[in-house]
Amino acid sequence: MKKIFLFAFLTSLIFALSSGAQDAAQPLKNKNIIMIIPDMNFQEDELFIPEAYFKKRGANVTLASSKIGEHTGMAGKTVTTETLYLDIDPVNYDAVIFIGGTGSVQYWDDLIAHSIVKNTVGKKKILGAICLAPMTLANAGVLKDKNATIWSDAKDQFIQKGAKYQGEGVFVDGNIVTASGPKYAEQFAEEISKLLLTFNTILNINCIDSIDII
């Protein structure tokens, strides 16, 4: 009987180590991320760098906008969306991210965008915004007294909405991550990933507390 228990324990251990290696290669496996872009003039690096970062680590990434179809960025690159932002329910995602660029001002005073922002915070999901997009968060009222940043041209309006402007870089306050521009796109993705990993369920193997080996 002890040999059977030992075999079961070793089998479980090998399976755990194998699964752990796979999880290490794709730590964001089964994480769902939605990235919201403006209809036009999104900032390419702010979209493509984090998107590639998340996908490389196994995350499922969905792109959304206020219109379905092809969108052109500030540098002329295009991307296609198949999801309308008005259909977004934050409960279905682990992270909701607003991408910047000059076109992102379309969401600053958009009530649907504000609802998404507030619901994301209310559901205790991760909320991210980069470049000019953090103004949408500020106008939605979720950055009051929060350490955050935005593209410097909009900092005065940002501060007026109660955000604690931190200057250039990437800043995390609770479950909210903001970045000041494309220069910080990869670091922005890294910080969001770190938060996502804190929600990962740690694998627990229930086995025999002790084994007597003859």
Image (spheres, grey):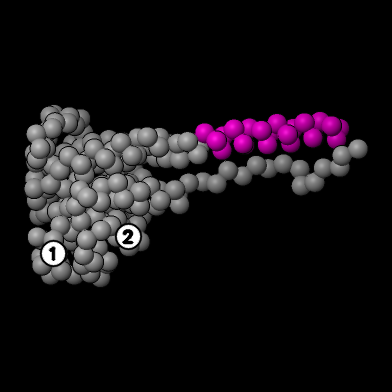
The image quadrant where one finds the C terminus is top right
Picture coordinates of residue 37 (x, y %)? Answer: 17, 41
The image quadrant where one finds the N terminus is top right
How crowded pointer 1 is (Cα within 10 Å; few <14, some 14-19, many 20+) is rated as many
Where is mark 1, residue-wise?
155
Residue 172 disc label: 2
Q: In terms of depth relative to the viewer, which is nearer, 8 or 75? A: 75
Q: At 74% across and 36% down in the image, what residue appears?
A: 9
Picture coordinates of residue 39 (x, y %)? Answer: 10, 39
Instruction: Determine which quarter of the picture holds residue 145.
Output: bottom left
The numbered mark, 2 or 1, whose residue comes first in the sequence reads: 1
Element at label 2: strand
Picture coordinates of residue 122 (x, y %)? Answer: 31, 56
Give the amino acid at mark 1.
Answer: Lys
78 shown above or below 134:
above
Q: Residue furthest front?
A: 183
Picture coordinates of residue 171 (x, y %)? Answer: 29, 60
Q: At 17% across and 29% down in the image, what residue appears?
A: 80
How crowded pointer 2 is (Cα within 10 Å; few <14, some 14-19, many 20+) is rated as some
Magenta region: which residues?
Answer: 1-22
Q: At 45% across and 36% down in the image, what residue appears?
A: 26
Q: Is residue 164 left or right of residue 202?
A: left
Give the amino acid at mark 2.
Answer: Val
Q: Is residue 85 visible?
A: no
Q: Is residue 135 left or right of residue 191?
A: left
Q: At 11% across and 54% down in the image, what residue appears?
A: 108
Instruction: Determine which quarter of the picture holds residue 65.
Output: top left
